[in-house]
Image (cartoon, rainbow, N blue to C red):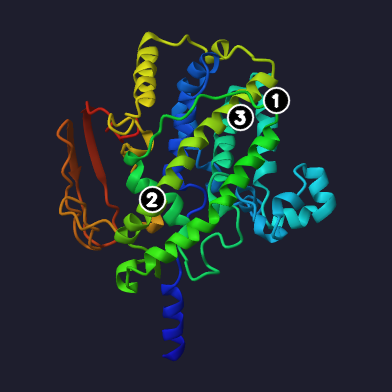
Amino acid sequence: MKKLLITFCLVLLCPLFSPGWGFFGHKTINQIAVYALPRPMQEFYYRHMNQIVQLSTAPDMRRNEDPNEAPKHYIDMDHYGDNPFGMMPKEWEKATAKYTADTLRKYGTVPWVVMDVKENLTEAFRQRDTAAIIRLSADLGHYVADAYVPLHTTINYDGQLTNQEGMHSLWESKLPERHLAEYKLDSESADYLKDPLRSIWDVVQNSYGFLGATFDLEEAVSRKFTPETKYTFSHKYGKTRRAYSDAFADAYHKEVGGMVAIRIKQAPTMVASMWLTAWQDAGKPDLDQMMGKKFTKGEREKLATELKAWKKNELVDKELVIAMQKEKAVEKADVIKSAEDMQPMPADASAPAAPAPALTPAPQAAPATTVEKSKVKAKDEDGKKIKEKRKKKGDKADKADDGWN
């Protein structure tokens, strides 16, 4: 009993953890990045915007299958001392020479992963590989966005070291999901990055600078709440999980909402700038020729409407944010079980009964379209042969529809 009680208490402390910005944030950032692109790229990206938005969460999905995926989303700068940005070489080769590749991968590699994916995207542009461009653009948008989250720059990524468990999903998921309408989503337009490595390191350093307020303000707001009002508990899959309550999230947002808003506004500009830089480094291939059919008048009008709403910060008001739209339920085919898994057929009065040993079989009902005459003669059980004569007249019935046509 005592062990069960201890186990239950530990489960209660298990927070809801969400990597990255959460699906909502990543989708929103990738969508807005499309609006921040210049004209030569915009129509191509807009044609594939829904794909890029949906694929923006693919790196988080891969974490469940690939053990090497998780370190690509963060970098624990506080592991490297009091002056980590002064101590850490920015180039991968120099960093590995100083700390070893194993150490870097253990504590996160997001700035270098951004550069790797950017180079892969550049090559995809050179090869005119549309599928790769879409996939890599979505991945690049994800990793760049992750670098904008302060909690992706510290060992104390979820507040687990300071009795503030659950801060990760609170900051990057719950706050934007509840308060996106209050943010300004009219991000700046993309620019070519002369030194993309330095640019992404600047992003990481700025995120790291927000850490102090991120933790301190949570502690300050907590003083106004009791444990009963600060947390909510949910039970799923046999586990009880703890998360910050809506009331606490709203109170915390009043203190840090500006921080969340500025990061979610800046991220799309950097994402679009990375896309633009990859495209320009590849020699500016003509993306219009890669679209197959020309951009239609309807597409152009729809894009113009969304760009206008973006510039006026009306995307939420006009219900144009894809992540906020309800997805249509996908109709699933009926599951057909194997014969051995199916339940026995219910008794059917019309089904023929097994004949008794010494009785004449009961005649079966014939289909409405079949004319059948049968004569059955049975002789005594003295060993004489039983003779049957059946006479059938034209069967005009078509084959029954089996439902697989």
Expressed as whole percent of the image width and height from the top left, the position of residue 386 reads 27, 52
Q: Dividing the picture into quarters, in which one does residue 140 lie?
A: top right
Work out whether mark 3 precedes mark 1 in sequence or the reverse, and give the earlier one.
Answer: 1
State the SS at label 1. Answer: helix
Could you tell whether 112 is left or right of 188 in the image? right
Give the image location of residue 331, x and y in percent. 32, 39
Q: Residue at x 69, y 21 (%)?
A: 281
All told, the count of numbered labels is 3
Q: Furthest-right residue in view?
A: 97
Q: Position of residue 51 (x, y in %)?
A: 47, 30
Which of these two is toward me, 386 or 127? 127
Residue at image mark 1: 123
The residue that mark 3 highlights is 274
**Disc 3 and disc 2: Cα gap in Å?**
26 Å
- Picture disc at residue 175: 2
Q: Residue at x 41, y 85 (%)?
A: 5
Comparing marks 3 and 1, which lies closer to the viewer?
A: 3
